[in-house]
Image: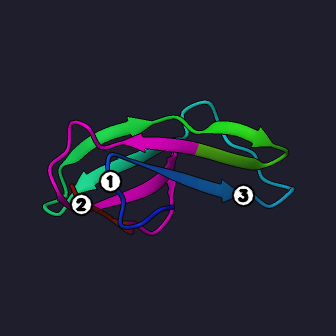
Amino acid sequence: YPNPFSITTTISFKLPTNQTLSSDTRIVVYDVTGIKLQSISPILKSVNEFTLVIDGHSLESGIYYYQLVDGNYSTAAKRMILIR
């Protein structure tokens, strides 16, 4: 949130109580062509709840995708829109 965003946006997610993140867990940001732009480590907010802020200062206006990647596991990519 927010989406669309201007400059920064926050991504929050919660894991099931029986699942933990490994030390190499990242949120990866891609452009529309699939080029990896950023890789950000989430921050523990509370028990099994994580948050991170994506800084769009270095990005142009447009559509981007983010994905949770943890070793061999990854979630479906979600869309976010940057408007300046």
Contact (Cβ within 8 Å) of mark 2 with mark 1? yes
Q: Determine which residue is flagged by label 3.
A: 14
Name the residue that disc number 1 marks.
6
Q: Which mark is residue 40?
A: none
Closer-to-camera residue (71/56): 56
Q: CA distance from mark 2 to mark 3?
A: 27 Å
Instruction: Give the secondary structure at mark 3.
Output: strand
Residue 82 place in picture, x, y as percent: 27, 59
Q: Which mark is residue 83?
A: 2
Is 61 within the magenta?
A: yes
Instruction: Look at the image and tell me whether residue 15 can be seen.
Output: yes
Quadrant of residue 38 within the rendered picture:
top left
Q: Which of pointers 2 and 3 lies earlier in the amino acid sequence?
A: 3
Residue 65 within the segment the image draws in magenta: yes
Seen at 79% across and 49% down, the residue is 48
Q: Position of residue 69 (x, y in %)?
A: 48, 49
